[in-house]
Image (spheres, rainbow, N blue to C red):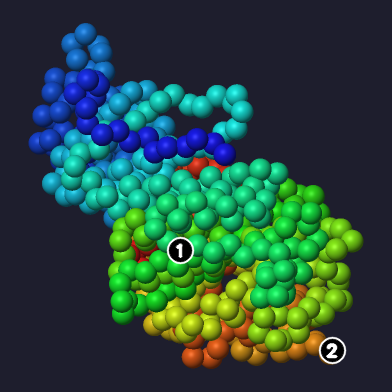
Amino acid sequence: MSENSLPLVIANETVHYTPLYLVKSQDEAVLSELCGAYGAFLRSQGFKGKEGDFTLLPNDQGSVIGAVFCVPEKKGPLPYGALATLLPEGVWRLENRTGSEQFLNEAVLGFCLGRYHYRLGQKETSQSVKLCVPEAVDPQVVNLAKAAWLGRDLINTPANLLGPQELAHRAQQELESRGATVEVIRGDSLTQNYPCLAAVGAGSDRSSAVVVARWKAREGARRLSLVGKGVCFDTGGYDLKPSASMLKMKKDMGGAALMLSLTCALIDAKSDVDIELRLGCVENSVSGHAMRPGDVLPTRKGLYVEIGNTDAEGRLVLCDLLAEASESKPDILLDAATLTGAARVALGPDLPALFSNDDELADSLIKASEKAHDPLWRLPLWPDYDAWLESPIADCNNVSSRPMAGAITAALYLQRFIPEKQKWAHIDTYGWNDVGKMGRPAGGETLMLRGLFEAFK
Ligand code: BES
Ligand code: MN
Ligand code: ZN
């Protein structure tokens, strides 16, 4: 595991800080005060004082004595990720000249998100760039950045270093250190309580684990139940994935990483909501103990599932956890999973798909995602397609009989395990940035962490 800590420092008299001024675009008064005699020169170099423009400030000897960044407005924290590559090595003290703390908070979050990297071994890390943060910064910004780094670290960790037990153990550590009660279920108890999940994990030499964590805000608080798909590696099982599709499958625990990091952020923020978290930690592998195409598996709910495709394992992991999570009738049940390639065909890598049996819940999640600039797109639980999951010999099949609407039929499969009155939302996410963008370095990504935090904080 890489030793990653946020690039933030607390003010300290012995360290030299260079000011980094946040300025509203085209704020000529502030810009000319900061740029002084060099205004015309800096403009000739391309610094126009527009949103996202950046310049270093020189003194008469040509040394760098500061920097200016013109804040992007109404775009959220990610555009500030540019600072992660624009700022030269050193410790920069944020000086907010915009008059609004929102820009300061966005800058700190965006910078932290942009500075993240995952490295193992002797591979060189980039130069050290740090921000010295003024007291006015919202502590929730730091919580969120920490949570995003945790989630990304888990997704980026290669599967040989992060198997089901390692994932469960790391979750237990993070949650217990925050005061949550954590139970890790393994062995016979796991097979009895989560028979379908256990069958998925049975193909691997690395045993499965279910993490159940509880955190209480107060007596009578609303109860949020979270479920995450933690497939540490997805070979596809006997329906083996082709190599190009298998290559990235260390990220198939992205749903678990998202739900764990969300829980950590909500606890750190002392949110007024009780949380129950379930992570299904398994490896979908091939062996003499692996489930076969055509097998029929029992589930916790009592339904029997025929295996049409061993690569549709995520829903087999989730169905037992969702059934158990529903038993205590939480106010909201929410799951996240890297569940289908079909959701990516429909929406691409940047837009997680949202499914919900409750319009109000769906609307509130979309509103929160818009507010956090962390987008999400709703797809329907189209009832007519549910019949595509029928099996001639069992209660249902784990895959659809028709090669269409794969994200919807996966969600409809999950819905069969949710009681009708249970408010439920399901997020089908990619969990990954194929190419690096501002605030989003290439690799593991906790898409919708900020959106969900906004919704439940
Ligand atoms: N983990 C994959 C889904 C996935 C693939 C997510 C690529 C993100 C990127 C999941 O377990 C899977 O293999 N789903 C199959 C389902 C199919 C067999 C019905 C898929 O989407 O191809
Ligand atoms: Mn799969
Ligand atoms: Zn999978």
Residue 37 vs residue 300, the one in the foreground: 300
Question: Looking at the figure, which quarter contains the C terminus?
Answer: bottom left
Rendered location of residue 437, percent (x, y): 48, 44
Mark 1, other Cα within 10 Å: few <14 / some 14–19 / many ≥20: some
Residue of label 1: 181
Q: Is residue 212 above or below residue 220?
A: above
Rendered location of residue 220, percent (x, y): 31, 79
Relative side of 231 to 429, left or right: right
Residue 16 vs residue 242, the one in the foreground: 16
Residue occupying image coordinates x 37% and y 69%:
216
Real-space CA distance between mark 1 and mark 2, rounded to the nearest whole angstrom: 41 Å
Residue type of the residue flagged with mark 1: Thr
Residue 416 vs residue 402, the one in the foreground: 416
Residue occupying image coordinates x 54% and y 36%:
2
Relative side of 43 to 185, left or right: left
Query: In what element is the residue under mark 2?
Result: loop
Pointer 1 or 2: first along the chain: 1
Rendered location of residue 38, percent (x, y): 18, 20
Residue of label 2: 393
Q: Which mark is residue 330?
A: none
Q: Quadrant of residue 1?
A: top right
Query: In what element is the residue under mark 1?
Result: strand
Residue type of the residue flagged with mark 2: Ile
Residue 431 vs residue 171, the one in the foreground: 171
Q: Is residue 451 above or below residue 49?
A: below
Residue furthest front as drawn: 188
